[in-house]
Amino acid sequence: MTIIETAKVTSKGQVTIPNRIREILRVTTGACIAFGVSREGVVLLPCKVTAESPYTPSEWLKIEKLASLKGKVYKSVKKAKKHIEAL
């Protein structure tokens, strides 16, 4: 069954997904939507976004070690700001 609904595009490129379509896709507030383009038109798919670390656990250990070895610790915010202004 093909369901056709229409919506207008705003000046910011935004479109409101019609309620009937949101119900079929089970899309609720804050949901993520994936867009695809096919010969037939645009495809909307509900999707999930998950956070993934760009580094492996061993890389994080190296980063943490470098962060602890390098840099200077200031005893006050005033001294840190003074150093930054001098750069």
Image (tube, helix red, strand yellow):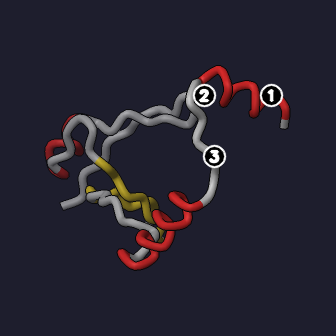
For marks 1 and 3, the one nearer the N-term is 3
Label 3 element class: loop
Q: Nearer the viewer, residue 1 or 35?
A: 35
- Rendered view: 14 above or below 38: above
Residue at numbered disc 3? 72
Between disc 1 and disc 3, the foreground one is 3
Residue at numbered disc 1? 85
Between disc 2 and disc 3, the foreground one is 3
Q: Nearer the viewer, residue 44 or 81?
A: 81
Label 3 Cα neighbours within 10 Å, binned few <14 / some 14-19 / many ≥20: few
Image quarter where the C terminus lies is top right
For marks 2 and 3, the one nearer the N-term is 2
Label 1 element class: helix
Left or right: 82 as drawn, with respect to 11:
right
Label 1 Cα neighbours within 10 Å, binned few <14 / some 14-19 / many ≥20: few
Residue at 45 percent of width and 69 percent of height: 54
The residue furthest front is: 75
Q: Quadrant of residue 66?
A: bottom right
Q: Quadrant of residue 80?
A: top right
Residue at numbered disc 2? 11
Q: Nearer the viewer, residue 61 or 33?
A: 61
For marks 2 and 1, the one nearer the N-term is 2
Mark 2 near mark 1, Cβ–Cβ under 8 Å? Answer: no
Q: CA distance from mark 2 to mark 1?
A: 42 Å
Residue at 29 percent of width and 36 percent of height: 18
Left or right: 71 as drawn, with respect to 52:
right
Q: Amino acid at mark 3?
A: Lys
Image quarter where the N terminus lies is bottom left
**Number of numbered markers:** 3
Between disc 2 and disc 1, the foreground one is 1
